[in-house]
Image: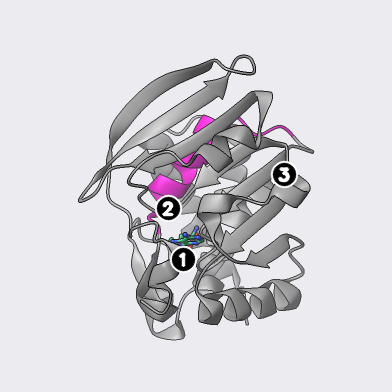
Amino acid sequence: MKDTPKHQGRRKKLADQLAEKGITDQRVLHAIKTVPRHLFLDSSFEDYAYQDQAFPIAANQTISHPFTVAFQSQLLEIAPGDKVLEVGTGSGYQAAVLIEMGAKVYTIERQHELFSITKNLFNKLGYRAKMSFGDGYKGMPAFAPFRKIIVTAGAPYIPEDLLSQLEIGGRMVIPVGDDDQDMILLVRESENDFKRHTFGKFRFVPLLKSKQSGQ
Ligand code: SAH
């Protein structure tokens, strides 16, 4: 569990690359420079951890590309203190970035193996989040509403439960599609009005239904 000047130097370079690719939110870039991504990966990938690549993690899932993490985080326009729901905890890297940006993070994961690995990692690294094992399609009604919602798996459609848990004025970022996904930003303008913006194509592992558990 070491973080050395070598790792810090690589992170700084990664943040510079992301800035060149269009990330302008300074809070995002600062978080990328701060979160030790190599500790969220299997140690065999340590040397590549600061390349802009996705990698396999436990339970056949992937940690998203740093650009994807930065892009989704930027679309959320995080302000310190924002209550954020994340669907798809995975390695915990995206959640850690949001925490570094000052968000209060609530995160759900449906694979028990990943849920426990990441919970342990957060304890070790001192990251605080409300972590839940369950079905992200349902959100976390007991803690709603959320100022921001981020889905980090490819959703076949936008789940109603998530829309209803978004605060008025809040923002939700969700990749929607099957083989590849459109990055969609929804801004809740009133009880019934959501303004929709579509960004480029991305590729995520699928947001699975709970009855498929174990896959
Ligand atoms: N945010 C993660 C990305 C992980 S990949 C990171 O930074 O590493 C997407 C994650 O979504 C996987 O861990 C997968 O198990 C999880 N997932 C898929 N369907 C889900 C569902 N219905 N509810 C909660 N999590 C789900």
User: Which residue type carries mark 1?
Assistant: Ser
Residue type, numbered disc 2:
Pro
Query: Under 8 Å from ligand 1: the CB of mark 3?
Result: no
- Percent coordinates x, y for residue 145 in the rendering: 73, 37
Based on the picture, tell me whether residue 71 belongs to the magenta stretch.
Answer: yes
Q: With 37 as the anchor, is 121 left or right in this view?
A: right
Kindly report the distance in space between the C-alpha atoms of the residues bearing marks 2 and 1: 27 Å
- Residue 162 x/y as whole percent: 56, 41
Residue range corresponding to the magenta coloring: 64-79
Residue 170 lies, in percent from the top left, at 64, 26
Depth check: 88 or 79 in front?
Answer: 88
Tell me which numbered mark, 3 or 1, is placed earlier along the sequence.
3
Say which amino acid is labelled 3.
Answer: Ala
Rendered image: mark on residue 103: 3
Say which quadrant the C terminus sits in.
Answer: bottom left
Specify whether 81 is left or right of 200.
Answer: right
Work out whether residue 94 can be spotted. yes
- The label on residue 66 is 2
68 magenta-colored: yes
- What residue is drawn where x is 34% and y is 25%? 198
Q: Which residue is mark 1?
A: 210
- Residue, far front: 211
